[in-house]
Each structure stands twice: as C-alpha cells, then as structure tokens.
Amino acid sequence: MTDTNSQKIEEILKRGSSEVIVEEHLKERLASGEKLRIKFGIDPTGNLLHLGHAVCLMKLREFQEAGHQVIFLIGDFTARIGDPTGRTNARAPLGEKQIKENMRDYVKQAALILNMKKVEIRYNSQWWNKMDLREMMQLAMKVTYSQVSAREDFKKRLAEDKDFTLEEFLYPVLQGYDSVALKADVEIGGTDQKFNMLMGRQIQKRYNQNSQDVITIPILEGLDGKEKMSKSLRNFIAIIDKPHEMYGKIMSLPDFLTLRYFELCTRISMQELADIKDKLANGNNPRDIKARLAKEIVKMYHGDKKAAEAEEEFNKVFRDKELPSDILVFQISKNNYLISDLLFDAKMVASKKEAKRLVEGGGVQIEIPNPNDQTPKRIKIQNWREEIKLEDGMIIKVGSRKFIKIKNK
C-alpha cells in the first residue's frame, strides 16, 4: 500500500517541482493508494552523475519512499543519437564502447540516493534493438511532422538554415515510445525535457495506454551561477566528488544560489527551509548559512564524519590560511618548466588555454619554502609564458582549491 497522506502528496508535487501535468489527475491517483510506475531516463553521454541529475533522483526517492515503483531507464540506445534539446548543432554520435564505459557506474552512483534493490533498472536497447523497420514505420505513423517540428530547437535551426538529421528529429519520438514500452504512469525530468515527456503522453494515447502524468524539475545552475550544471562546462559538482572537493565547490557558489540549493539538493524539512529563507532575508551571515549547506550535502553522500572533516579542512585552508592536509605530489626530473606546461602536465587544468586564462586572471601562485623563516615566499605568476625554476617542496596553487607539491626525482 502506498502513502496517501495528503501532506506527503502535496510535498511530492510541490517541492522542487516546476510544473505538474496534469496535477489534479496525478493528485487523485496518489490519494487513491494505487502503486504507480515512475519513470526517469538518462542517456549515458558522460560517466558521472552530478547534483543536477540528483535533483531528479531525489524526487524519485520521494516517490519510492511513498511506496511507488521507480524505473531507472538508461538510454544506451538513444545515447547513440544524442538528445538535441537545447542544441544549435548536431551532437557528435557516441560509439557503443564509449556508451558502455559511461554507464558502467551509473547504477552504483544512483544508489547513493535510491534504494536500487527496489528500483526497476532498464535499458532502452532492450526494445529498440529488437524493433524491425515495419514496427518503426507503424510508430512513425502515430506522430505528425507538425508535432515534432514545433519543437523550439528545430524551429531555430530551420530559421537559421542549419541542418538537423532525421535521427535527431526522431529522438523525441524514441523517448516518447520508451514510456509505452515501460507502461509509465509518471515521468520525471528537467524542464528542458518537457517536449519529450509530453510526446510520451501523445504516443501512449496512440497505443491505447493511459497518458503518463509529467513532473518537470528545475534546471540546477552550476558553480558559475549562470549556466546549467554540466560536465562540458566544468561547472559541476559530482555526487562522487571527494568530501573536501564537494564542500569547497559548494562554498564557492554565489550567495544567491544558497536557498535554491537547500531546496533542490538537500532533504531538510520545509519548516527548516522556511527558517533559512528568513535568516537570509534578515541579514544573517550568508557564509555561515552556506557552510551549513555544504555540510548537509556532503553528509548526504559521505556521512556525518566525512562532512565534519571536510568542514574542518576547509576552515584550515581558507580561514586559517594553512596548507591542505593532503597535497598531491607532482614528480619532475627537470629544473625549469613553462608555467602553462606545468599546470597542464600536472593535470591542474584541462587545457593550456585554461592555464593561460588562470594566469592572466591572477589565479596562479607559487609558494617557496624558506629554510630560515617559517613564513614561505609567495609569488603570484603574471605571465603565462614564464619559465619557472622548480625547487623541491615548492607548492603551486591554482585558484582557491587546487594545490600540488613539487618533488624532484
């Protein structure tokens, strides 16, 4: 039997939701005690789940805790095409080997939020690899050109005379049919997935199934506070980030995102959420409130002890201006190194272009140990072409959270 408590149902429908389609219909079904099939799909276009994904997973957890059947759909077939949502150019197709590599740890990562023993784990290759051309044509007959071409991404590309492939055009149809194959009662996804999820409602109707209800979830902004959280933009917080990395990233968030992250990324009560909102409005120190946010999120994925240790480490480095307890060591066999090459070779940046940007922005500093003085010599690097004379024990600091120690071989 499912949880039919009206307050619980209200929280499921309201907290962290942008829109519910059709709200009254779904509310009635939840109140009836019927066990619903709740679908969430994700294409393995990368190998990490981040807090943006976790917002949807946490909504799934609410349904799971209320007694409903959660379906975790891995789009190993649709990943070969790539979701055109929000794209102005075609996505480079992924090979089968890369897809398998990407999805290898998806279930393990999702288990940090969901009870995967009670989750129905599916892969859409299970039905798409079996569908023949005749069946595909029957599906295509159930969807009109005007329905799919109404999608904003496609309209924009047409207006700009940019190509899109027939595969991309069919993507919403494929995702919609997934709901037919799974007999989904509810689908959860980001607001950017609304078109695809509504397509599922239409296609289910054409296959004489009841149309799924849809819950859209807000898109979580990344560390820059502007763009959506994304691996490609390097503004993400992975749910398997190390505790101190996760804590530090959260503390770097713009203050205006603190309340939003509390609502979407934690499981604190609605009353606690209201209290935090009041504190922010009344001028309480936003850093202290953000510190609680960081600790809450780290605790969710790593436990109380690791969260406390992450907080202590952060305060040690940023409040007390000490070096981290555990600094990565970069072993070298030469005495001089171009700073841009050093940062790239030590994997402190993703590219030499990023190294140049960081140096020019004043984000790179070297710290040279002084044997005659406890205070080390600190030098900010100004020229990205500068050649650095390396010394054993030298510390390189990039940004506010990355450190390496130089060790001569």
Image (spheres, rainbow, N blue to C red):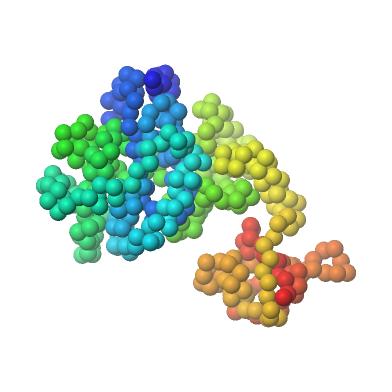
Which residue is located at x 88 percent, y 69 percent?
Answer: 372
Which residue is located at x 38 percent, y 57 percent?
Answer: 99
Asked whether residue 190 appears in the rendered view, the answer is: yes
Taking depth in this image into account, of 45 and 355 the one nearest to the observer is 45
Which residue is located at x 62 percent, y 48 percent?
Answer: 243
Quadrant of the image containing the N terminus: top left
Q: Position of residue 254 (x, y in %)?
A: 55, 48
Classify residue 234 as left or right of residue 193. Answer: right
- Relative height, residue 314 to residue 70 (above, below): below
Classify residue 332 as left or right of residue 186. Answer: right
Residue 218, image quadrant: top left
Q: Position of residue 155 (x, y in %)?
A: 21, 55
Quadrant of the image containing the C terminus: bottom right
Number of labelled discs? Answer: 0
Residue 286, image quadrant: top right
Q: Position of residue 281 (x, y in %)?
A: 56, 34
Q: Where is residue 43 in the image (x, y as percent from the top left)?
A: 36, 51
Classify residue 296 as left or right of residue 320. Answer: left
Residue 367, image quadrant: bottom right
- Relative height, residue 39 to residue 341 (above, below): above
Which residue is located at x 38 percent, y 28 percent?
Answer: 68
- Relative height, residue 400 to residue 364 (above, below): above
Asked whether residue 146 appears in the rendered view, the answer is: no
Taking depth in this image into account, of 344 and 146 the one nearest to the observer is 344
